Image: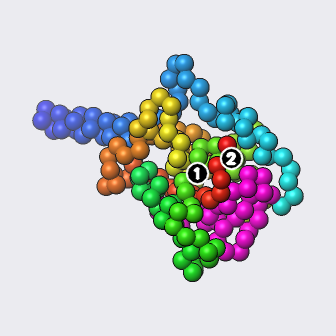
Amino acid sequence: MKRFKGSIMFFFVIAAFIIVGCYPYQTTEPGREAPGFLPYGDMIDDYEMEIPNRFVDNGNGTVYDHATELTWLKTPSLIPRMSWDKAVKACESLKDDGTSLTDGSSPGDWRLPTLNELQSLLSTSKRTRRMLQDHPFVNIKNDYYWSSTKDDYYDDSAWLVRMPTGTLFYYHVDRYGDYIYFDQYYVWPVKGTRGY
C-alpha cells in the first residue's frame, strides 16, 4: 500500500512539473510592464479609427488592412500548430499554391507578424480585448498565435497573442522541441512593411 501511494504521489508531482513547465509565462513579475495596453496599446489606437471597409477580402486567400497597410492570410488555421523556429520558416516559405492562396506571392514575401501587428487586429478597449468586428477572416482558432517579437528580458522567449481575446504571454521559442505539443502554437502570416 505504501508503495502504491508513493507511486501515485510521484505521478502527481511529475504531472504538475510538466503542466507548470510547459505553460506560457504571464507577465506578473515585479517591476515588469505587461504589454497588454501599454506601451503597445497606445501604438494601436491610431489604427482603430473608423475607416470605411477597413478590411478588404482580396478574393485570393488574403485580407488587406487599410489601417496598417498589411496583408494577412484570410484563413490562419491553414497552417498547423508548430514551434517558433518552424513558424518563422513556414511564413518565409509560404507562396501562391494555386488553391487556397492565389495572390501570386513567392517565398520570402510572407513573414511572422510582430506583437504590435497581431494586436492591431484587436480592440484597444481596456474592458474588452477582442477581435475587431466586421472582419472577413475565417476559422480563427481560440488559441495562442506566435509573434516574431522576442521578450526584452528573456531573449530565448517570444510573445504570443491569444485570439480572439488578446491575452498576452511569452514562452520559450524552443524549450522541448517539435515533439512536445506544448511547444507548438498557431501561425498567422502577414506581408507588408513593418511600420510599427
Q: Is residue 25 visible?
A: yes
Q: Quadrant of residue 175?
A: top left
Q: Residue 144: x percent and y percent?
A: 53, 49
Residue at x 78%, y 52% (from the top left corner): 67
Residue at x 64%, y 43% (from the top left corner): 116
Front label number (2 vs 1): 2
- For this view, does 193 lie left or right of residue 168? right
The front one of 28 and 50 is 50
Magenta span includes 71: yes
Q: Which residues are magenta?
A: 54-81
Q: Give the SS element for disc 2.
A: loop
Residue at x 67%, y 31% (from the top left corner): 39
Whether 56 is drawn above or below 28: the answer is below
Residue receiving disc 1: 113
Q: Which mark is on residue 195?
A: 2
Magenta span includes 165: no
Whether 113 is drawn above or below 101: the answer is above
Q: How is the image coloured?
A: rainbow
Give the crowd class for mark 1: few <14, some 14-19, many >=20 residues within 10 Å.
many
